[in-house]
Image (spheres, rainbow, N blue to C red):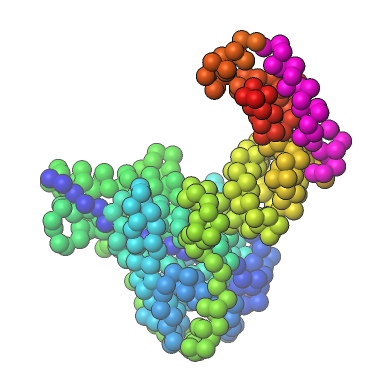
């Protein structure tokens, strides 16, 4: 029998706000534990929450970037549970009236465009961070109460590749939109993954298994692949998939049972009495919409259509925001987009990876790359010399024009110098000359090579070719 997997993701993203969701505590990753806390995020009796306006704005902007409808009226609910990561024993979240409804992510998977639809995005607060050591558990409340939004997809994906493409696109959109830095190592993007399997042709979805709280995209992919195989095996052997919550053991690459539906939590949601509902006007939504940045997919299209770059280049340049922004800054000073793209994809990426640096740390600034390209375009230096200048500046800093002068890298287009080298090459290589005259056009390349060598790479290749042809054809 053939089986089909169905996958849905609930992705938690920590927003880029200065302060927490319902109090004025700062959030600072890596700070001394329990130093950014107050009566509100420690759940002291009587402490009252105050809504973070910036978080609401970022959640709605995320919704607009993902094509959601912004709910004009949304409200807050308490999700009750007893666990030390939430000191007040409930989490403030949005149960039935979230900020954003619907939406979608369009992305290419293995060469095919697919659209994955969203159910909703709601705003909530983050839990504290628990660390389990040698039979004890430590709790750091610095993270408790930080702004967290949950993006819930429909069960519309069918493979680990779908889920990975969806998550990668989601992360990219959130970064471009300035919503979140989405650093998985800092727990800024974490997903719960729902997986079920059914025989192809069966309408009803199979029993769903939820794999909780994963940050690494590679682990998410492994967990989905493992889980699909495991469920098919259960069905093939005549068994039933148990609806349950499973964890992922990254060392073994396997999922394992954590709790079954029978003892699943009953969160007993009820409306939060300490907070007003959120009402958002059409004017406000219009204002936020006007502030949205250009998304990667739009940039990619513009690079191809307006700058004439190949699809491949446009994809590489927009893969992360820092590179794309850097490219944009060079383009302020030049019109030669392809040359900029070649330098970024070639010299820049090679040197950055060799030195373990980010593009922001490069000593070659956008202005300096534009100058190097201008020198090449003016035929003052060859492309090869341009790459050398780039590497010198990358390693030591400096000014392109000055380096060209100091190192004597300028091309020679001066006729008398070229003529000397050309005559010399023709005189000392009778055989290629003969071959060329006998109709073997390629033989001129050898002579060209000789002139370039004599000039130590500084002769202008176009001018050399012209000079040689003149002499041999004439
Ligand atoms: Zn606080």
Q: Residue furthest front?
A: 474
Quarter of the rendering occupied by the C terminus: top right
Q: Position of residue 406 (x, y in %)?
A: 87, 36
Q: Is residue 200 left or right of residue 443?
A: left
**Foreground of the two, 64 or 237:** 64
Residue 410: within the magenta? yes
Q: Is residue 172 left or right of residue 457?
A: left
Dominant SS of magenta comes to helix
Asked which quadrant contains residue 288, the reply is: bottom right
Quarter of the rendering occupied by the N terminus: top left
Q: Is residue 187 left or right of residue 28?
A: left
Q: Position of residue 195 (x, y in %)?
A: 29, 55
The magenta segment is: 400-429
Task: Kindly identify the residue that appears in the image at 68 percent across and 37 percent down.
Answer: 383
**Foreground of the two, 199 or 442:** 442
Residue 447 at least partly seen:
yes
Residue 79: within the magenta? no
Asked which quadrant contains residue 153, the reply is: bottom left
**Foreground of the two, 473 or 224:** 473
Q: Position of residue 138 (x, y in %)?
A: 57, 56
């Amino acid at each position: 029998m053939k089986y089909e997997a169905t996958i849905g993701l609930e992705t938690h993203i920590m927003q880029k706000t200065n302060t927490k969701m319902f109090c004025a505590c700062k959030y600072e990753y890596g700070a001394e534990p329990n130093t950014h806390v107050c009566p509100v995020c420690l759940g002291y009796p009587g402490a009252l929450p105050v809504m973070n306006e910036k978080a609401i704005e970022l959640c709605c902007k995320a919704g607009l970037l993902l094509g959601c409808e912004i709910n004009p009226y949304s409200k807050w609910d308490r999700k009750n549970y007893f666990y030390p990561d939430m000191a007040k024993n409930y989490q403030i979240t949005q149960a039935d009236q979230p900020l954003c409804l619907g939406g979608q992510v369009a992305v290419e998977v293995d060469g095919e465009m697919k659209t994955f639809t969203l159910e909703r995005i709601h705003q909530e607060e983050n839990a504290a961070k628990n660390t389990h050591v040698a039979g004890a558990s430590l709790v750091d409340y610095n993270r408790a109460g930080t702004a967290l939004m949950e993006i819930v997809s429909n069960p519309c994906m069918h493979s680990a590749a779908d889920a990975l493409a969806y998550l990668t696109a989601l992360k990219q959109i959130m970064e471009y939109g300035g919503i979140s830095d989405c650093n998985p190592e800092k727990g800024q993007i974490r997903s719960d993954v729902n997986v079920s399997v059914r025989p192809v042709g069966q309408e009803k979805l199979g029993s769903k298994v939820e794999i909780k709280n994963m940050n690494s995209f590679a682990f998410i992919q492994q967990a989905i692949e493992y889980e699909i195989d495991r469920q098919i095996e259960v069905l093939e052997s005549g068994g039933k998939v148990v609806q349950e919550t499973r964890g992922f053991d990254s060392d073994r690459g396997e999922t394992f049972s954590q709790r079954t539906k029978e003892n699943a939590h009953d969160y007993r949601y009820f409306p939060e009495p300490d907070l007003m509902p959120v009402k958002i006007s059409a004017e406000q939504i219009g204002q936020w919409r006007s502030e949205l940045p250009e998304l990667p997919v739009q940039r990619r299209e513009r690079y191809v259509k307006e700058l004439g770059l190949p699809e491949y280049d446009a994809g590489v340049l927009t893969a992360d925001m820092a590179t794309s922004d850097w490219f944009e800054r060079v383009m302020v000073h030049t019109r030669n987009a392809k040359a900029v793209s070649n330098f970024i994809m070639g010299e820049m990426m090679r040197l950055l990876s060799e030195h373990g640096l980010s593009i922001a740390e490069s000593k070659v600034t956008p202005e300096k790359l534009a100058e190097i390209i201008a020198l090449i375009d003016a035929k003052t230096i060859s492309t090869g010399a341009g790459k050398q200048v780039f590497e010198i500046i990358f390693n030591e800093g400096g000014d392109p024009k000055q380096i060209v002068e100091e190192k004597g890298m300028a091309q020679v287009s001066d006729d008398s110098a070229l003529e000397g080298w050309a005559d010399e090459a023709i005189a000392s290589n009778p055989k290629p000359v003969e071959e060329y005259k006998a109709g073997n056009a390629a033989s001129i390349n050898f002579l060209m090579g000789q002139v370039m060598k004599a000039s130590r790479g500084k002769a202008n290749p176009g001018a050399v070719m012209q000079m040689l042809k003149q002499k041999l054809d004439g």
